[in-house]
Amino acid sequence: MSPARRRRPDRGATGAAVEPLSYCDFVDRALFDPAWGYYSTGGVRFGEGGHYDTYPLALSPVFGRMVAHYAFRVWQRRGRPPRFELCELGAGNGQLCLDTLLGIDGEARRRPTWRAFAAATRYRIVERSVGLVTRQRRTLGPLAARVTWQRADLAQRAPAAFGPVGLIVANEVLDCLPHHKVVGTSGGPGVVHVQPMLHRRPLGPAALAAAMRDPAARQRVRFREIVRPLRQLPALARCIARYYPELRDLPPDAPPVFVAPRLASLLANTARCYTRADAIWIDYGELRRFHLRAPEWRKAFAGPPRSGRSIYDAPGADDITFMVDFTLAADAARDAGWQVVAYGPQAELARLSGIAVDDGLLEEIVRQRALVWMLALAGVGAEATWRSGAIGHARGTTAGAEPVRRYVARSLREFRRRRGATFKLLLLRR
């Protein structure tokens, strides 16, 4: 879609002027609009056979055990406080919370020090989506009684302090923050806006929500990109001046650069959650040089992995994610008072937690996946519908299925990758 430059606002069916949404606002609505957003409506499919899989799911229950062991080490280093909180941002279907709590309980049955840790530990989930909170409660079952839910968007508003000491865990949170799309123009940096259209009429936010709720109308909505000067968005201009000096001279033929001011806000607001805290951020991303040079298709994604879909193909029905700019993340973290302790491949989580990722873990994960798959075949679990046809014990057992052992072995290889790893870990402390 080639950007169009317009000087006058379009007019809707009533003749009133309709302003386009910034690309950032459009993405946020496509993900979290209460009426039609991907995460808000509860239609997201987690796990194999669904819309996407994550390492807390692919390596269950081992990934949660890593978090439990790292949390135990943080608790010890902080002087074994009588109250310690594990805080997960954006908990997906709740699997990481479940595995972490079970990992703590398993160690507490064998070791007195872990029993003291378990008695001191509380688990908090910070979640924007009501639909996902419901899914998380179903996953946790009786363990939900040990979890506190906080409905909040920490990327836009700071909460009251949660407690004195905590560990914040955020897996694939930064990648779904809405980004601005910045392009070079002959007059300086420009910012892409999106104008939804239906029957050649522009749609404002309310009309867009109504159209996206109607399956027939949704198929006919089209989206047009419009470029406006950066100066029209002062908050974004300030963010770029502070963190992206390279964009002042962005040439017109350069690939677009995606900028997430809410990433800086999120890091600042999470710094206020606890007096003393560690934070683990795991996401796919790269440093600034990649973001300035890579083409758009390598930095912004929609739909299932490797589908090649655009954010305009099925907004509200597709996930939308971005490669994270870890240069921005580290700089914004320091501005917020965090100390950057480590940055590197996500395999660092295993080393920091003291968990050896070996063949013994392969067998444990295979048994877990096999159990989940068999339960799905029996119709048990929130993800049973799509998981039952996604994975089998031998090639050809189900159309398109991948054998359990091969799937787990591939996931472990990708997790352990150190050179050229796509998923990175950023460890912060204050």
Image (cartoon, rainbow, N blue to C red):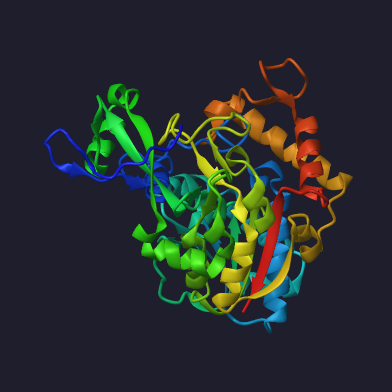
> Which residue, as the protein is rendered here, is positioned at the far right?
359
**Residue 364 visible in rendering:** no
Residue 38 against residue 259 in the figure, above or below: above
Spot occupied by residue 305 in the image (x, y as percentages of width and height): 61, 34
Spot occupied by residue 354 in the image (x, y as percentages of width and height): 81, 63
Q: Nearer the viewer, residue 369 or 32?
A: 32
> Which residue, as the protein is rendered here, is positioned at the far bottom?
79
Residue drawn at the location 48% of the way across and 66% of the way down = 239
Q: Find residue 208 and report its image quarter.
A: top left
Residue drawn at the location 22% of the way across and 37% of the way down = 207
Q: Find residue 276 and report its image quarter.
A: bottom right
Spot occupied by residue 392 in the image (x, y as percentages of width and height): 71, 24
Locate residue 318 relative to residue 74 in the image: left or right: left
Residue drawn at the location 65% of the way across and 58% of the way down = 288
Residue drawn at the location 73% of the way across and 75% of the way down = 113
Locate residue 31 relative to residue 382 in the image: left or right: left
